[in-house]
Amino acid sequence: MTDGQTRGDRRIPDEAPAPDEELAWLDATAQADLVRRGVLSPTELVEAAIARIERLNGKLNAVITPLFEKALATAGAAELPDGPFRGVPLLLKDALCHSAGDPAHSGMRALRDRGWRAPEDATLTKRFRSAGFVICGRTNVPELATSVTTEPLAYGPTRNPWDLTHSPGGSSGGSAAAVAAGMVPVAHGNDMAGSIRIPASACGLVGLKPTRARTSLGPEFGEYWGPGTHEHVLTRSVRDTAAVLDATAGMAPGDPYTAPAPARPYRAEVGADPGVLRIGFRTAPPGASAPAHADCVAAVEHTAHLLDALGHRVAPEPAPALD
């Protein structure tokens, strides 16, 4: 994205740019580099993220469980892991990816009213921590993460930073809104039927559903959610999406299967020549009862023409019939 596409004053009406505006739009790789070179400390990065969350969340309702005291303690600790994202603030989607001792409600009023808290970190949470990320809070989701919009009765709707009258999509809507608004450069999400990809599209982000078994759902949810739900993140850069996968991929106890290790790091694929790819595209989902909006069709066709011009083999692929 260009600077004109990512600045916060285009997103949230009537918000004056904050002093940390430029820092807000650096991706996680760039923020980690500032820490590595001693330009900023992890505490300074986390304090800036907290300030942005406090300034913007009243309009967006993206973060439902702030964990600011824990985050500041983690950022200032001598034992903060020296991983590739040391000191970079991160938000967790409030579904599946538990963090020990913190509320975990999956958008459900029953769990909220009971005050349920997770007894332990999920495997992916541990890997985020080992990579050096500092968890600053948990983000809003629809009930049981089963909707393409994010408006649970338990916590209310999340707004899209680009237009507060619109939804950021779902089910990782809180995470998408937070990253798109510059609260944090990376936020966790998970995806069965579009729950990373839909909000990424609605909020202008990078959203990848990794191949099955690339990321862990252990120790609790692998057997139940493993066949269809895949964990990863929403970001503002392809290099972040690749580098986070490098830091977090791999099976663990509780996962029902594994995937072969990649031939080289995912980060090495960024900018690499993929060769000529065979790419199919559709402008309507299978079984749709209404046509896709003309703007959506135009965007898909524009992308197809661009890929064709780059030398790839691109052709429409009819949607399969559904019984």
Image (tube, rainbow, N blue to C red):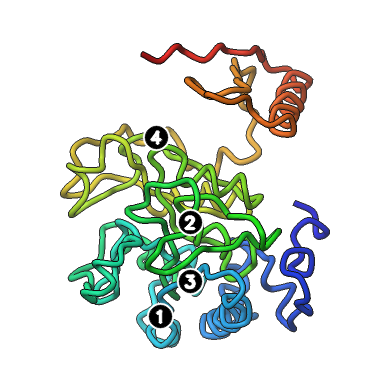
Q: Nearer the viewer, residue 229 or 41?
A: 229
Looking at the image, is mark 4 or mark 2 earlier in the sequence? 2
**Inter-mark Cα distance, 2 to 3:** 12 Å
**Inter-mark Cα distance, 4 to 3:** 28 Å
Picture disc at residue 127:
none
The residue that disc 4 covers is 211
Label 2 crowd (10 A; few <14 / some 14-19 / many >=20): many
The residue that disc 3 covers is 63
Picture disc at residue 67:
1
Quadrant of the image containing the C terminus: top left
Looking at the image, is mark 1 or mark 4 earlier in the sequence? 1
The residue that disc 2 covers is 150
Q: Secondary structure at mark 3?
A: strand
Label 4 crowd (10 A; few <14 / some 14-19 / many >=20): few
Tell me the quarter of the picture where residue 141 sits: bottom left
Please report the residue visible at 53 percent of the width from the left and 24 percent of the height from the top. 289
User: Horizontal placement of 236 versus 194: left or right?
Assistant: right
Residue type beneath disc 4: Thr
Q: Position of residue 92 (x, y in %)?
A: 41, 64
